[in-house]
């Protein structure tokens, strides 16, 4: 998910001494250094950075938008569809984790309560409900308040500002590309701060400067994360669930990988009886 995003320092290449079988150094690799940008590169980066800031400013002022985010890598796919508003929004998740195939919906209402509704796997991972109790929670709306254990993980990326914070970019240059339907778009290219995942880009409308899509390599290097934006200026229309179970009344414990971490506990190794051979 692009998320709310969340996501700057370059990763240096350490000096490596390759030792032959005889023990003598055979090669030394010097640290990688980035070439000093020339005047034209600096000018292009400054122009791209200004355009990126202009696009985010225009987007942050919007009453809302609709988006779809898809991440692939490591043999799994995460899909998130949502509608963001200034202080409210909704998201629908489909993802595969060690808990299984998680499907769940999140609603953030103006009083900042998050409502969760999902299947058993999602209840375990996102809410910390035990495996034995998860089926009883599945399908019910659960209200999560500020200060509740899973709140920070659930509410991130739902509002306009939070969702846009995930479209981060150290802009370096721009180019013109053709979007769907032959639409001409301005592409802002750059890198993601704090990662070594390669080149990312944000496509924006050359007239409104509003984002159309954001694409970045996955953090594991095995796929991509793509987010598309539509319906700019449209605030979400949400209905607060009429009944919901308070998360604080459930019997829960934080999962091994943290709330929403997608990681189940690793079974402890079976002790070897004293005197037994291994």
Image (tube, grey):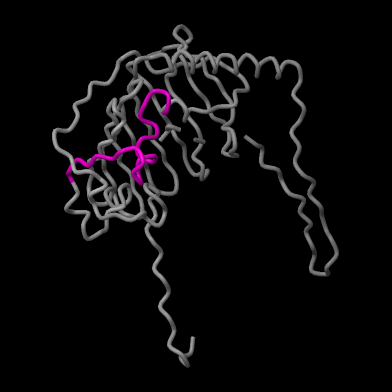
Q: Residue furthest left?
A: 242
Q: Is residue 52 left or right of residue 115?
A: right
The magenta-colored residue range is 139-162
As for residue 222 lying within the magenta part, the answer is no
Q: Residue furthest right?
A: 24
Residue at the spot 83% in from the left edge and 69% down from the top edge: 22
Q: Pick the residue in front: 245 or 186.
A: 245
List x then y, in percent, for residue 198.
Answer: 58, 35
As for residue 147 lying within the magenta part, the answer is yes
Q: Is residue 156 left or right of residue 244?
A: right
Query: Is 41 drawn above or below residue 273 in the view shown?
Result: above
Query: Is 48 drawn above or below residue 264 in the view shown?
Result: above
Q: Pick the residue in front: 176 or 190.
A: 190
Splitting the image into 4 quarters, where does residue 270 fall? bottom left
Q: Is residue 30 left or right of residue 175?
A: right
List x then y, in percent, for residue 114.
Answer: 29, 35
Q: Pick the residue in front: 121 or 144.
A: 144
Count numbered badges in the picture: 0
Query: Is 163 drawn above or below residue 54 in the view shown?
Result: below
Residue at the spot 38% in from the left edge and 22% down from the top edge: 229
Q: Residue furthest bottom?
A: 275
Residue at the spot 19% in from the left edge and 43% down from the top edge: 245
**Quadrant, the N terminus:** top left
List x then y, in percent, for residue 145.
Answer: 30, 38
Residue at the spot 39% in from the left edge and 18% down from the top edge: 180
List x then y, in percent, for residue 154.
Answer: 35, 39
Q: Pick the residue in front: 75 or 264.
A: 264
């Amino acid at each position: 998910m692009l998320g709310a995003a969340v996501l700057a320092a370059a990763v240096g290449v350490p000096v490596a001494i390759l030792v032959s079988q005889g023990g003598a150094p055979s090669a030394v690799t010097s640290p990688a250094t980035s070439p000093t940008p020339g005047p034209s590169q600096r000018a292009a980066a400054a122009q791209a950075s200004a355009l990126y800031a202009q696009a985010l400013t225009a987007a942050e002022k919007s009453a809302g938008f609709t988006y779809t985010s898809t991440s692939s890598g490591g043999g799994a796919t995460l899909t998130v569809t949502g509608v963001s508003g200034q202080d409210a929004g909704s998201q629908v998740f489909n993802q595969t984790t060690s808990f299984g195939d998680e499907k769940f919906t999140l609603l953030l209402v103006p009083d900042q309560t998050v409502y969760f509704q999902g299947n058993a796997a999602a209840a375990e991972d996102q809410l910390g409900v035990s495996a034995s109790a998860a089926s009883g929670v599945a399908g019910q709306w659960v209200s999560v308040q500020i200060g509740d254990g899973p709140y920070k993980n659930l509410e991130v990326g739902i509002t306009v500002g939070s969702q846009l914070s995930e479209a981060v970019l150290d802009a370096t240059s721009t180019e013109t590309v053709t979007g769907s339907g032959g639409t001409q778009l301005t592409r802002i290219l750059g890198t993601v701060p704090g990662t070594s995942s390669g080149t990312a880009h944000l496509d924006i409308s050359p007239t409104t400067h509003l984002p159309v899509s954001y694409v970045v390599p996955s953090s594991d290097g095995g796929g991509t994360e793509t987010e598309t934006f539509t319906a700019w200026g449209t605030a979400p229309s949400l209905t607060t669930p009429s009944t919901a179970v308070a998360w604080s009344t459930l019997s829960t414990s934080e999962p091994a990988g943290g709330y929403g971490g997608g990681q189940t506990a690793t079974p402890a190794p079976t002790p070897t009886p004293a005197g037994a051979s291994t």
